[in-house]
Image: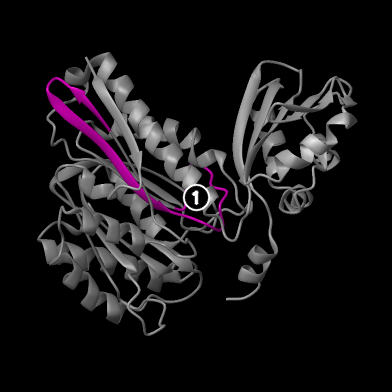
């Protein structure tokens, strides 16, 4: 019987999982001449079963193409090398060669197969990787791989780009006298609207689960977490979410049983949801986190269309930044999702404060609307009264700071 479930954020991340080591180093990938951490390593001496989801962008970065190939092969995975500051995207054959070399450098440093190393990159698109720096930095970092908390935290810092803080979470539970751990780290602040992936998210567990099971669990968790967030409506070329299982606990599906597997899925989902929420909360220069709840749709796909129309509307996002309860923009966006809604039966509210009931605005509540949208976090709840399906999207506002930050590199 699974018991003693715990969950926490702001942990040391990957090194919380027994058998996993991490390290980080500065390779000055950005060419700024500083010592900012920009290269992270994750390593398990025991080979891991692995699953991953990736961007569905037609323009895929070289590391994504490499990882897709290696995950599809079903070969065990020992390690990950991930860098920030350079996406290695739209870099042609040279980029593919560089991604392979990054994996080979780490493999040679650890005495493992090159095919057992995954690569993650994030940063500027269209710029060649500074391989001379990585040829020196990766082996140096490999010598410092450790299970200690500081190493895990350093790795979480090293993968950040425009993020202002690391993103880590850990869940644990007891089963058959053993402790199962699921922990992860992620980055993402801009170009956030993934589709079956996130920016970069690396999760690990000591459960003994096969790749096929991990794939199913990861896909369900990603769908309910990373695929339900948006900051700016842009999908990255590098979106990657990886789950590694080293089996250190010795507990497989049979040993875990129905109860243990249900608890494991809960743990994985909690970690994914926490990392996803941290991404939106740390969105580039945002000031509001808004939960868009759509209910009463004919299908989940319709509910998602409406949620994304609202959450990605520049007019809506601008009004959120201005703390203006401009509900007309919300319903306009819902309408152009074109799911066949009837405006005369809609119920809209900001949290528990009614805005429109049965298609009729409740103008007496205007001061309450203003107070609610002035908060740093609030919800928009829209019932379409068309069916039973629902979808929730975590979104943000659009600020002057976001425009200023992204108007040039």
Q: Residues within 10 Å of mark 1 (few under 14, many from 20)?
A: many
Q: In this view, does 114 lie to the left or right of 213?
A: left
Check disc 1 and report the residue beneath it.
Answer: 279
Residue 200 lies, with reference to residue 50, above or below; the image says below
Q: In this view, does 264 lie to the left or right of 225?
A: left
Quarter assignment of residue 255: top left
Q: In this view, does 155 lie above or below 138?
A: above
Q: Which SS class for mark 1? A: helix
Q: Which residue is drawn at 61% across and 69% down?
A: 405
Asked whether residue 176 is drawn in magenta, I would say yes
Q: What percent of the width, then of the height, locates residue 275?
A: 43, 44
Q: Where is residue 392 in the image (x, y as percent from the top left)?
A: 60, 32
Residue 358 lies in quadrant:
top right
Q: Can residue 91 be seen in this view?
A: yes
**Image location (x, y in percent) of residue 6:** 30, 30
Taking depth in this image into account, of 211 and 373 the one nearest to the observer is 373
Residue occupying image coordinates x 72% and y 53%: 321
**Does the stretch in magenta take in 111?**
no
Residue 337 makes an appearance in the image: no
In this picture, residue 309 sits left or right of residue 195? right
Residue range in magenta is 172-199
Q: Nearer the viewer, residue 235 or 21?
A: 21
To which quarter of the image does residue 23 belong?
bottom left
Residue at 70% x, 20% y is: 298
Q: Does residue 346 sit above or below 162 in this rendering?
A: above
In x, y percent, where is residue 200? 41, 53
Quadrant, the C terminus? bottom right
């Amino acid at each position: 019987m699974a018991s003693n479930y715990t969950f926490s954020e702001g942990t040391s991340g990957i090194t919380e999982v027994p058998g996993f080591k991490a390290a980080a180093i500065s390779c000055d990938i950005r060419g700024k001449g500083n010592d900012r951490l920009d290269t992270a390593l994750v390593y398990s001496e025991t080979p891991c079963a692995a699953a991953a989801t990736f961007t569905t962008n037609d323009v895929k970065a070289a590391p994504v193409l490499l990882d897709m190939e290696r995950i599809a092969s079903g070969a065990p995975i020992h390690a990950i090398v991930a860098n920030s500051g350079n996406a290695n995207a739209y870099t042609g054959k040279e980029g593919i060669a560089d991604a392979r070399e990054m994996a080979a450098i780490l493999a040679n440093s650890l005495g493992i197969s090159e095919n057992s190393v995954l690569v993650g990159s994030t940063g500027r698109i269209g710029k060649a990787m500074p391989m001379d720096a990585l040829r020196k930095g990766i082996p140096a970092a490999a010598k410092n791989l450790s299970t200690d908390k500081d190493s895990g935290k350093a790795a979480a810092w090293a993968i950040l780009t425009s993020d202002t803080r690391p993103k880590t979470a850990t869940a644990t539970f007891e089963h058959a006298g053993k402790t199962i751990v699921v922990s992860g780290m992620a980055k993402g602040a801009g170009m956030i609207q993934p589709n079956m992936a996130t920016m970069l998210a690396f999760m690990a567990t000591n459960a003994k689960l096969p790749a096929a099971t991990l794939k199913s669990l990861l896909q369900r968790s990603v769908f309910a977490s990373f695929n339900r967030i948006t900051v700016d409506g842009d999908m990255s070329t590098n979106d990657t979410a990886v789950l590694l299982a080293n089996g250190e606990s010795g507990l497989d599906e049979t040993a875990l049983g129905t109860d243990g597997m249900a608890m494991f899925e809960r743990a994985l989902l909690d970690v994914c949801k926490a990392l996803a929420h941290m991404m939106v909360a740390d969105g580039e220069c945002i000031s509001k986190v808004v939960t868009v709840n759509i209910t009463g749709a004919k299908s989940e796909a319709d509910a998602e269309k409406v949620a994304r129309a609202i959450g990605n509307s520049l007019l809506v996002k601008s009004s959120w930044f201005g703390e203006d309860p401009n509900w007309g923009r919300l319903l306009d966006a819902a309408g152009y999702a074109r799911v066949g809604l009837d405006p005369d039966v809609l119920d809209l509210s900001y949290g528990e404060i009614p805005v429109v009931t049965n298609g009729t605005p409740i103008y007496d509540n205007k001061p309450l609307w203003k107070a609610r949208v002035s908060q740093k976090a609030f919800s928009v709840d829209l019932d379409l009264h068309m069916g039973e399906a629902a979808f929730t999207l975590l979104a943000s506002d659009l600020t002057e700071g976001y425009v200023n930050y992204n108007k040039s590199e």
